[in-house]
């Protein structure tokens, strides 16, 4: 069983990124459940989705229990640190080195904390995903890079991912996202 | 031998729609509301992909939706009405009496509850409605059951001549789980309505008889539930057993995979013999449920000394951790999770919060900036604009239910003898849902306050659905767009004016004029929802030569505006990737420091 928690900011594509993993697991013949949040929370607020996949064990709960996430895919640094407590002992962070100050910071009421990247790095990897995706053509492909890094660890076959990308993404965005995924999977 | 269909990964809402499509449902009506909004669009997609003639509409509210569905049922069609939990409050009037009339074509009422209030004003448990009205209820636990139970609900409805409530929750509606289902639809002929006054004219004499018929039907449904596979026993080990339904069942299976469980798919009426036979086999039986002790109290009333989780767990969403915590409190150690979840864990303190905010370029922002400046009491309503209650706008002071803001403003004005004049803000879709009778009431009763209709041509919070003000139907057909100004005039409003949200000065002037007017005034602030209509123009940028760090722009609470530290100073900056070019900040700036990014070559980042 692998419990994968996605954390980010509403509008960043948290739901789509977790959809890609869930569809890849389904296409590989794995058991899978996924929980997401819609509505009010999506308006630029903190967004979390849960994906639970297993090649052999049944998946009952769509929600990951506290402290049981095997992977935390953080699309933004502050949201990564906010959900770090969900990670199991030995669980892995895969984070984008991206900062999006919340309204409490931009309005001057709070400051964006220092040292978030180090906190996340102590539990896994912080990758320049947005930077890399921008260089490759579009910042919005950043999540595919993180999924590539996850895919390498998870052991889902590449054709399952490829078929999930084709099923979930807009055909226009498919090529760049797939190249970005492969870049993430290459570990380079 | 037919080939086993491939599993599909569907949300609970998509799966319900698939089950309804398979069952030959040919009319569906709804008012959008999280977490139910995707059901009708999904139904349309199933029909587009795989055929079938299904009429779907966004009705103006849930009561109307259920009444439209009831007409379709009388005509012999299989039909459904879908809504969020609080929508059933609106539809409660037809809901209760439909239990008496029963159906011709199967009638499915879908209530999507929101335990944990992810996007709602309360977390009422609508299972209680089933018992109150006497309407059988099915509670799916995942998408496969959502599909299967939707199909089953139509059969039950027709077999027992009663509507059926399909009760979903956020975690069922918005979880994606595999569904194996055939893509065949049982098309049905709709024969039309024929008079049957004893059944459909609910005058007292008829209704009295129909109430008796309902009680007999419910007894038959309960007996059906004793045998039907919709309720089942998962055999297990140990002498402590459990009774559960819906999501609670899934969580229980996760934390106690070996335990014997009576899994109830139909939670009203309860299968009494099945429950009795199950309970007597074990030393201890614990009911595990989310929100109210609905099953617990009924099973106790049947005379079984079952246990329950600690009462504190009936507030909020049931999660694996809270279940583990609750079980430990009643002396049951979970065995299924590795590592065991640590209930002491939680988010770290001290991190800056990230509340949801109005989008960049939101048509409501300018209005609330003006309301804040005018320092009036603002009665609010249900929609994106409730976000204006948060800092820095902090200009919305009530939010109760759909349409309440107008009536609350009227109440404030009447209670203070006209000394306090409130401004009632209400979105365009909410106005058509329940604001119209509220405004009519206030005008009729001499209300002295301002109604401000925020017309962004969208049911925005739930995903940008159409409504009578947009002039387009759910099926994309062009329709007549409601003219809010003419409607307000026809209702008798003496002062009606329209202001563009792109012009804060015009909004302020209009509101001041309306507040000075004695009697009901209606101001319509128009501007498209940028999310729904993908409004995006050239971004703005800030010229540091002119900026004096006054932070007026930041007080608009726009996510595209932020602070950047440079030379020891915190400079306001505009994120060009987020800015959609509405220009409100440029109008707010007293020094002309904000202009189009390509015009001043400023430091958009």
Image: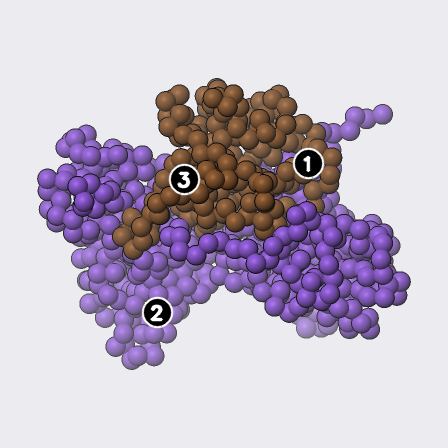
Chain colours: A brown, B purple
B120 left or right, relative to B512: right
Q: Please, what secondary structure does the residue beneath circle 2 have? A: helix
Q: Earlier in the sequence, mark 3 or mark 1?
A: 1
Would residue B127 be visible to someone looking at this image?
no
Task: Judge by depth and name the residue closer to the eye, B235 or B31.
Answer: B235
B171 left or right, relative to A81: right
Mark 1 residue crowding within 10 angstroms, few (<14) / some (14–19) / many (20+): some
Residue at figure coordinates x 30%, y 61% from the top left: B395
Which numbered tag is attached to residue A5?
Answer: none
Chain designation of label 2: B
Q: Which residue is mark 3?
A: A117
1 or 2: mark nearer the eye? 1
Chain designation of label 1: A
Which numbered tag is attached to residue A54?
Answer: 1
Q: CA distance from mark 3 to mark 1?
A: 30 Å
Which numbered tag is attached to residue B409?
Answer: 2
Residue at figure coordinates x 78%, y 73% from the top left: B301
Q: Please, what secondary structure does the residue beneath circle 1 have? A: strand
B460 left or right, relative to B137: left
Vertical placement of B273 versus A103: above or below? below
């Amino acid at each position: 069983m692998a419990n994968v928690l996605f954390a980010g900011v509403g509008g960043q594509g948290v739901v789509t990124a977790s959809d890609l993993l869930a569809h890849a697991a389904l296409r590989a013949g794995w058991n899978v459940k996924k929980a997401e949040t819609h509505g009010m929370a999506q308006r630029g607020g903190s967004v979390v989705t849960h994906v639970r996949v297993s090649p052999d064990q049944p998946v009952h709960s769509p929600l990951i229990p506290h402290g049981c996430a095997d992977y935390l895919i953080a699309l933004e640094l502050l949201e990564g640190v906010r959900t770090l407590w969900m990670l199991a002992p030995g669980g892995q962070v895969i984070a984008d080195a991206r900062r999006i100050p919340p309204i409490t910071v931009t309005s001057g009421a709070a400051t964006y904390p220092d040292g978030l990247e180090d906190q996340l790095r102590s539990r896994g990897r912080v990758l320049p995903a947005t930077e890399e995706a921008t260089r490759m053509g579009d910042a919005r492909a950043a999540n595919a890079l993180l999924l590539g890094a996850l895919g390498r660890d998870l052991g889902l076959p590449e054709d399952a991912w490829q078929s999930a990308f084709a099923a979930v993404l807009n055909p226009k965005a498919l090529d760049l996202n797939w190249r970005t995924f492969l870049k993430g999977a290459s570990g380079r | 031998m037919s080939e086993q269909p491939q599993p599909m990964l569907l949300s609970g809402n998509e799966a319900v729609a698939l089950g309804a499509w398979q069952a030959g449902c040919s009319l569906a009506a709804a008012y959008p509301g999280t977490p139910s909004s995707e059901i009708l669009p999904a139904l349309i997609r199933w029909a587009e992909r795989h055929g079938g003639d299904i009429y779907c509409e966004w009705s103006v509210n849930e009561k109307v939706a259920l009444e439209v569905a009831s007409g379709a049922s009388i005509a012999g069609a299989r039909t459904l009405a879908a809504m969020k939990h609080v929508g059933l409050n609106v539809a409660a009037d037809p809901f209760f009496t439909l239990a008496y009339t029963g159906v011709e074509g199967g009638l499915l009422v879908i209530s999507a509850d929101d335990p944990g209030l992810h996007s709602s004003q309360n977390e009422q448990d609508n299972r209680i409605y089933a018992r109150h009205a006497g309407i059988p209820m099915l509670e799916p636990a995942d998408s496969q059951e959502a599909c299967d139970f939707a199909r089953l609900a139509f059969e039950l409805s027709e077999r027992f001549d009663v509507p059926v409530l399909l009760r979903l929750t956020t975690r069922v509606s918005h979880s994606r789980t595999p569904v194996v289902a055939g893509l065949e639809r049982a098309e049905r002929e709709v024969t039309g309505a024929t008079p049957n006054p004893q059944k459909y004219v609910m005058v007292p004499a008829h209704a009295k008889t129909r109430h008796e018929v309902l009680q007999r039907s419910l007894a038959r449904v309960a007996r059906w539930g004793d045998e039907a596979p919709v309720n089942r026993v998962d055999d297990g080990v140990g002498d402590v057993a459990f009774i559960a339904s819906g999501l609670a069942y899934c969580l229980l299976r996760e934390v106690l995979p070996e335990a014997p469980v009576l899994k109830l798919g139909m939670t009203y009426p309860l299968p009494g013999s099945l429950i009795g036979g199950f309970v007597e086999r074990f030393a201890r039986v614990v009911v595990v449920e989310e929100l109210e002790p609905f099953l617990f109290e009924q099973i106790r009333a049947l005379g079984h000394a079952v246990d329950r989780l600690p009462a504190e767990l009936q507030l909020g969403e049931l999660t694996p951790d809270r279940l583990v915590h609750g079980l430990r409190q009643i002396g049951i150690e979970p065995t299924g999770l590795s590592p065991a979840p640590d209930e002491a864990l939680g988010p770290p303190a001290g991190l800056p919060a990230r509340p949801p905010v109005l989008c960049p370029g939101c048509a409501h922002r300018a209005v609330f900036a003006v309301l804040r400046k005018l320092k009036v009491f603002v009665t609010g309503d249900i929609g994106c604009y409730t976000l204006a209650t948060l800092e820095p706008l902090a200009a919305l002071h009530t939010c109760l239910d759909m349409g309440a803001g107008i009536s609350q403003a009227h109440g404030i004005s009447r209670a203070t003898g006209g000394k306090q004049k409130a401004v009632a803000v209400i979105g365009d879709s909410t106005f058509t849902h329940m604001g119209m009778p509220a405004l009519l009431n206030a005008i009729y009763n001499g209300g002295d306050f301002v109604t401000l209709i925020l017309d962004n041509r969208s049911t925005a919070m739930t995903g940008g659905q159409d409504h009578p003000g947009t002039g387009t139907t759910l099926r994309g057909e062009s329709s007549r767009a409601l003219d809010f100004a003419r409607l307000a005039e026809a209702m008798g409003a003496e002062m009606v004016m329209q202001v563009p949200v792109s012009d804060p000065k015009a909004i302020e002037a209009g509101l001041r004029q309306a507040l000075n007017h004695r009697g009901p005034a209606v101001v319509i602030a128009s501007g498209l929802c940028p999310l729904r209509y993908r409004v995006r123009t050239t971004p703005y940028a800030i010229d540091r030569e002119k900026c004096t760090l006054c932070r007026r722009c930041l007080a608009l609470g726009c996510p595209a505006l932020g602070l950047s530290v440079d030379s020891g100073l915190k400079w306001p900056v505009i994120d060009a990737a987020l800015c959609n070019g509405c220009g409100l900040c440029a109008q707010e700036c007293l020094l002309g420091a904000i202009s189009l990014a390509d015009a001043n070559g400023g430091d958009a980042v």
